[in-house]
Image (cartoon, rainbow, N blue to C red):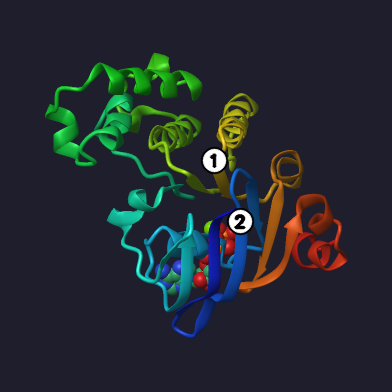
Amino acid sequence: MNALEIKKLVKHFDGVYAVDNLSLAIEKGKIAAVIGPNGSGKTTLINLISGIVPIDSGVVIINGVGARAIKPYNVPAYGITRTFQEVRLFNQMTVIDNILVVLTERNVFGALFEKHSAHHLKRVEEVLIKVGLWEKRSALAQSLSYGQRKLLEIGRALAMDSEVFLLDEPFAGLFPEMLKIMVAAVKDLRASGKTVVLIEHNMDLIRELADHVVVLDSGKLLAEGKSEEVLSRPEVMEAYLGE
Ligand SMILES: Nc1ncnc2c1ncn2[C@@H]1O[C@H](COP(=O)(O)OP(=O)(O)OP(=O)(O)O)[C@@H](O)[C@H]1O
Ligand SMILES: [Mg+2]
């Protein structure tokens, strides 16, 4: 079964086709890596699926349900969670509250004043331990290092308990220790039957993690399929790696 299907998706900005008639399918329970040169449309693809940017034409089908106009506030209802290339957090809130906010009202003030159930607090603890931030739970998000911010963002995504996770360069710029935590978190998602679509440039990580690889070039699909197979194609090496 496909967790995600895209049919003839198009998005252009002032004459530039960021996503150009793109069709693809991602199988449930797999990790798919989206690769391609800078500006090839990877982030735009995730923005379209998560409703951050409106679709020009085409359809996104999430867990079998088709959508032409996805609104960001509806995205959790589709069973999708995303992270951003430039991490987005509630900077003035604590680490704990950054996670509670998605577990409760999905509303900043609601999360601050609501009395949290033991169940929610337990879930926050689990997630923060998993991403190595339990010790930092009372710190403000703005005081965290770059890597800790990325881990908090993935922690928040994990807490959402979605079916499909769209991760825009989750590993970029992480030092080895944090990279290990992030890799483990992504593998855990697959182990629990979730689907992950991640954007990544590091070939070693892609080989280690991805079941499926999608290669974009100027918004078009250059290749897709099983990782080893796609990564060994000469045209992929040429377009992407310059080899
Ligand atoms: N909001 C926007 N307004 C105008 N042009 C945009 C916008 N978002 C993306 N683009 C353009 O669309 C194309 C694809 O950009 P996108 O950010 O999706 O690429 P990417 O593959 O994620 O690149 P990178 O690897 O650098 O993150 C680029 O030409 C970019 O300049
Ligand atoms: Mg990008």
Q: Is residue 76 above or below residue 111?
A: below
In the rendered image, the residue lying farthest to the top is 135
Q: Using residue 38 as the reference point, say whether residue 147 is left or right of it.
A: left
Q: Using residue 211 as the reference point, say whether residue 140 is left or right of it.
A: left
Residue type for callout 1? Lys
Q: What element does badge 2 sit on? A: strand
Q: Residue at x 15, y 35 (%)?
A: 110
Q: Is residue 98 above or below residue 125?
A: below
Q: Which residue is mark 2?
A: 26
On the image, which quarter does residue 206 sit in? Answer: top right
Q: Which residue is mark 1?
A: 194
Q: Is residue 201 above or below residue 134?
A: below
Q: Using residue 92 as the reference point, say whether residue 234 is left or right of it.
A: right
Q: Residue at x 24, y 34 (%)?
A: 104
Q: Position of residue 42 (x, y in %)?
A: 56, 61
Q: Position of residue 193 (x, y in %)?
A: 57, 37
Residue placed most toward the observer, 95 or 26: 26
Q: Residue at x 70, y 45 (%)?
A: 210
- Quadrant hosting ligand 2: bottom right
Residue type for callout 2? Ile
Q: Position of residue 203 (x, y in %)?
A: 75, 47
Which callout, 2 or 1, points at the residue further toward the start of the chain?
Answer: 2
In the rendered image, the residue lying farthest to the bottom is 15
Residue 125 numbered mark, or none: none
Find the distance from the CA under tag 2 to the CA under tag 1: 12 Å
